[in-house]
């Protein structure tokens, strides 16, 4: 169920839509918070493993943002994913949904990609 949730999310479904699909597929009601915690937990574990790998990105990226509520405040979680490999290229958490925050996301991703090429 967790793997299905992650796959649906990284295929582009929102957490709410993932929640609906989990209910349809497995007949189980899972909260959006639980799904989000799965995404955060397992993405971190996968990132730790992927950081040890050398890989070739397609250069074609998908950028997405999701509004989440943290301690009563709304935040924006941004991500860049390589379309072909589905590797997470960059992430950013911000309090605003502005072009400045998108620029921060792209700078972080660029630094990460340049670092990987040097290693």
Image: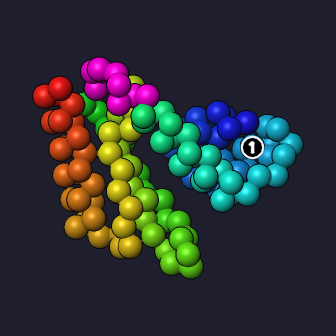
Q: Is residue 47 visible?
A: yes
- Mark 1 sits on what residue? 22
Q: Residues within 10 Å of mark 1 (few under 14, many from 20)?
A: some
Main secondary-structure element of the magenta-colored stretch: loop
Q: Which residues are magenta?
A: 49-57
Residue depicted at x 60% and y 53%:
36
User: SS for tag 1?
Assistant: helix
In this picture, residue 46 sits left or right of residue 108 = right
Residue depicted at x 68% and y 54%:
34
Q: Is residue 53 magenta?
A: yes
Residue nearer the viewer, 111 or 8: 111
Residue depicted at x 15% and y 36%:
114
Q: Is residue 17 above or below residue 76?
A: above
Q: Residue furthest right?
A: 27
In this picture, residue 66 sits left or right of residue 37 = left
Q: Name the quarter where the N terminus is drawn.
A: top right
Give residue 86's quadrant in the image.
top left
Residue depicted at x 58% and y 35%:
7
Q: Is residue 68 above or below residue 52?
A: below
In this picture, residue 59 sits left or right of residue 67 = left
Q: Is residue 94 magenta?
A: no
Colour convention of the picture: rainbow
Q: Is residue 57 above or below residue 113?
A: above
Give residue 89's quadrant in the image.
top left
Q: Position of residue 8 (x, y in %)?
A: 60, 39
Q: Name the quarter where the C terminus is drawn.
A: top left
Q: Position of residue 71 (x, y in %)?
A: 55, 75
Q: Position of residue 87 (x, y in %)?
A: 39, 32
Q: Is residue 17 visible?
A: no
Give residue 4's quadrant in the image.
top right
């Amino acid at each position: 169920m967790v793997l299905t949730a992650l796959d649906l999310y990284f295929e582009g479904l929102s957490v709410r839509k993932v929640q609906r699909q989990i209910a349809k597929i497995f007949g189980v009601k899972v909260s959006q918070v639980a799904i989000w915690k799965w995404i955060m937990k397992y993405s971190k574990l996968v990132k730790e493993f992927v950081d040890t790998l050398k890989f070739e990105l397609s250069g074609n990226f998908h950028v997405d943002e999701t509004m989440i509520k943290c301690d009563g405040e709304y935040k924006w979680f941004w991500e860049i994913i390589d379309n072909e490999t589905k590797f997470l290229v960059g992430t950013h958490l911000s309090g605003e949904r502005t072009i400045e925050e998108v620029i921060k996301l792209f700078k972080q991703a660029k630094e990460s990609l340049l670092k990987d090429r040097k290693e």
